[in-house]
Amino acid sequence: METEINSTVTKSKPVARVPDPGAPSMCFSKILIGMVVLAISCGGGWLGAASHGQDKAAQNLAQQKSAVTSTANLVSSIAESVGQSVVSVNVTSESPGASYGGLFGFGYGPYTQESAGTGVILSSDGLILTNRHVVPTGTTDVSVTLSDGTVLKKVKVIARTNTRDTLDIAFLKVEDTEGKKLVAAKLGDSSKMKVGDAVVAIGNTLGQFQNTVTSGIISGYGRSLQAGDESGSATENLDDMFQTDAAINQGNSGGPLVNMNGEVIGINTAIASDAQTVGFAIPINNVKGLIASVKKSGKLERPYLGVVYVMLTDDIAKEYGLSTNRGAYIPKASDMGTETVLKDGPAAGAGIEEGDVITKIDGVTINEKSSVLSTLSKHKAGDTVTLTVLRGDTTKTIDVKLGVAPAS
C-alpha cells in the first residue's frame, strides 16, 4: 500500500474668412452653407461612431448568448449520453453500535441504516464502479436504480480497497439485469486534463435527486487530503485528487466527473465541508489498473510498493531539510509514529530505506501531475518497476517487483 500523509476630444478653432464687400449676402450664405455642411459632417461622424459602437456591442452580446447557448446544449447532450451509464446505489448496512461503559453502561446496540450513493457502469454485463465508503464493511444489501427508474435488486459487492488504501474504490456486479440493456460509460485520459478545463459532474444528490447535473472546471490537481464522515468517527487519507468547483453534494460519491467529450475522467469522492463548491475526484487513470484486474479475474489485485510517503512541496522539503523539493519522501518511522517502509514489503526487500526520496518511476518524474499512486496504477501486481531514488546526496536506481496489496 502506498499512503500519503496533506479620450478627450478637443475642438479646433474655426479659421476666420474676410467677406467680399460686393457680395455680402452670397459670402454669408457660402459661409453659412459651409458651416452647415461642417455641422452635418461632424454630426454624421458622431452618429456613425455611435452606430458602430452599438453594432459592436450588439455583436458581442450575440456572441456571448451564442456561446452560453452552445455550452448549455453541450452540457445537456453530455448529461443525456453519459446519464444512461450512471446509477444510484441504494445501500442497507449494519452498524455494530457502541458502548460508553460506566456505571450504567450507556451506549447503543447494533442497528440497521440506509444510505445512497452513485455508481458508473463499466460493462454491459453489470460491472459498476463506485466509492468504497458508499458500500462500506457491514453492507448487507445493495440495489441500483437505472436512469430510467428501473431498480435492479440483485447486486453484489465483489471488491473494495482496504480502509488504509488512498484509493477509495469499490466494484459492484449486477447479477440479474432483468433484460435491461446496460450502457457502459466511456473512460477518458485524466492525465490530459488541465486547470481551467470544463467538466460536468453527475450524481444522486442528497441520495434523492437522481442524476443531478452540475458543471464547472478543474480547479487543481495532485491534491492530498484527509476525509471523514459527518460524525468524524471515520477518516481516510486521499492522494492525488482532482479539485473541481462543479457542485458535488452528499450522494454524489462514486459518480462520474466528465470532460466535454463525454468521457469519464474522474470519480467524485469528497467535498470540503467548510467551503462552497470545493470538491474532489479520483482521476480515472488511477483506477484503470484495478478495472482491468477486476474485469480479468473478478478480483481486485492492487499493485503496491509497501511504503508510507509524503509528496514533496517547497515547504515540506524545507521542513525536512531535503535537497530536492519534488518527489515522494519516505519519512523516518520515528517522525511518523508508524512504520514507513513496511516489513516484508516489496520496497523493503529491494533495499528502499527510510529517508529516501523517490524522484522517478520508470523514468517518469514524480510531482504534482505524476504521483506514485497514478504511476503505479498503470501497472499490475508482479510487474517490475525501476525507481530513481535520492538518498542523501547520492542518486540510486533500484528495481522493485510490485506485490499485491493486502486485504487489510
Image (spheres, grey):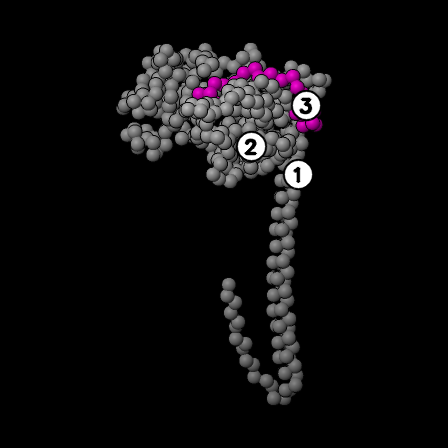
User: Residue 231: image x %, image y %?
Assistant: 48, 30
Q: Residue at x 50, y 34 (%)?
A: 271
In the rendering, which numbered label is found on residue 274? none
11 lies above or below 176:
below
In this view, the residue in front, 171 or 293, is 171
- Whether residue 164 is in magenta: the answer is yes
To which quarter of the image does residue 368 belong? Answer: top left
- Whether residue 406 is in magenta: the answer is no
- 209 lies left or right of 195: right
| Residue position marked by numbered label 3 in the rendering | 151
Q: Secondary structure at mark 3?
A: strand
Q: Which residue extends farthest bottom?
A: 21
Query: What distance separates the C-alpha of mark 3 from that of mark 1?
Result: 29 Å
Q: Which portion, as a residue range, is magenta? A: 145-168
Q: Quadrant of the N terminus?
A: top left
- Circle 1 packing at 10 Å, graded few (<14), some (14-19), many (20+), is few
| Residue position marked by numbered label 1 in the rendering | 73
Q: Nearer the viewer, mark 3 or mark 1?
A: 3
57 lies above or below 331:
below
- Amino acid type for the residue under numbered disc 2: Gln
| Residue position marked by numbered label 2 in the rendering | 250
Q: Residue at x 66, y 22 (%)?
A: 183
- Amino acid type for the residue under numbered disc 3: Val
Query: What distance separates the C-alpha of mark 1 from that of mark 2?
Result: 26 Å
In this view, the residue in front, 167 or 250, is 250
Q: Quadrant of the C terminus?
A: top left
- 43 lies left or right of 378: right
User: Residue 193: image x %, image y %?
Assistant: 52, 31
Q: Which residue extends farthest front?
A: 103
- Amino acid type for the residue under numbered disc 1: Asn
